[in-house]
Image: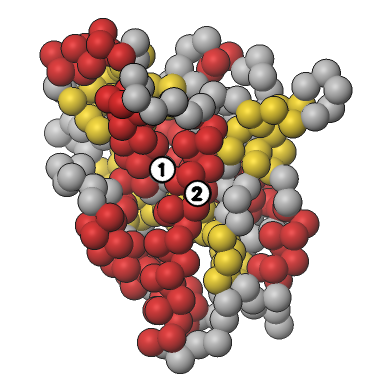
Amino acid sequence: MPNPTAMIAMGGNSLSPKGEAGTITQQFTHTRETLDGIGHFIEHGYNLCINHGNGPQVGNELLRMDLTHDRVPPLPLGVCVAGTQGSIGYMIQQSLQNKLRDMNVDREVVTLVSQVIVDENDPSIKDPTKYVGARYSAEKAKSLAEKFCWSVKEQEPGQWCRVVPSPMPEYIMHGKSIKTLVDRGTIVIASGGGGIPVFNDSSGHLEGLDAVIDKDYAAAKMGRIIRAEELWIITDVKYVYRNFGSPEQTPIREITRMETKELYKNGEFQKGSIGPKVRAAMHFLKYHGEKVIITSIPGIKDAFKGNAGTTIRNYA
């Protein structure tokens, strides 16, 4: 019987949590903590592909460029995404190689710089929606927006953040190569930060686009390419909740895709940052996958036993 295959989407905030400076030392520490959870997949013989968020890291790059723009030429947003694919991929790859060594497991880990084709006329280009970087008070965010010509929006009550365009991924390049590696047991880190957004110009050549792709939706697309049975979305909450943020808030432990679709249509999951994750889950299950698990890093071990996380299945 072939080994099961899982696509794992790691949140950028899991490597650089709210309230921390986000130093490389801190990010390495959190990367290693995250990979303690990934070790459970390895113990169970899973073939794996991993992608990661990069919101805090790209936000820091953008702020760094804003502060030094009069001395160092700024870089396009797509180049920043490429840079974080390398830096975050390096942290995950090195930490996972060390984890495999400690487990006495002989498997290779590779990081691929991944381009993702998007529509250059995607509506999000004119209406930025993707949160990147640190969170600020309303006063601080508006001050930075005025100083650096940012677009800012309220992400959660009282917490404001910079927003940038986030076009939908249409096609992930290098998919055949990624699937070949995954099928052979290589652990692949790909489509980091959702992938580097590119489009085909009038001559069919690739050109970069100043945007950031949602990494969870890209993970759902990648999961289809590698024919993964499972998509795991690792975030900063242990469950998806109904009535999130209200006194009636309750965790969802198991639910079907159709039940999820109905709740979403009726306005559930719209608060906070869970909405895109639920949309990605429905996309993955609609076209191929068997189940999606949404949970936190500490919840991974218990989620394997069915004791934590929200599991969305194609069928009851």
Residue furthest to the right: 203
Q: Which mark is residue 54?
A: 1
Quarter of the image for residue 39 reads bottom left
Does residue 22 show up? yes
Secondary element at image label 1: loop
Left/right placement of residue 141 relative to residue 127 reads left
Label 1: few (<14), some (14–19) or many (≥20) C-alpha neighbours in 10 Å: many
- State the count of labels: 2
The amino acid marked with disc number 1 is Asn
Quadrant, the C terminus:
bottom right
- Please say if the residues under marks 1 and 2 sit with CB atoms less than 8 Å apart: yes
Whether residue 312 can be seen here = no
Which of the image's four quarters has the N terminus?
Answer: bottom right
Which residue carries the number 2 mark? Answer: 85
Q: Residue at x 47, y 36 (%)?
A: 80
Q: In the image, residue 188 lies at what x, y percent?
A: 59, 64
Expressed as whole percent of the image width and height from the top left, the position of residue 23 reads 23, 51
Q: Secondary structure at mark 2?
A: helix
Nearest to viewer (mark 1 / mark 2): 2
Which percent across, then down, holds residue 204?
Answer: 84, 27
Report, in whole angstroms, how far the alpha carbon at label 1 lies from the one at label 2: 8 Å
Query: Tag 2: residue type?
Result: Gln
The vertical placement of 149 against 130, above or below, is above
Q: Is residue 170 left or right of residue 66?
A: right
**Which mark is on residue 110?**
none
For the point 32% across and 68% down, which residue is it?
32
**In the rendered image of this protein, does residue 218 appear above or below residue 105?**
above
Please report the residue visible at 49 percent of the width from the left and 52 percent of the height from the top: 86
Q: Earlier in the sequence, mark 1 or mark 2?
A: 1
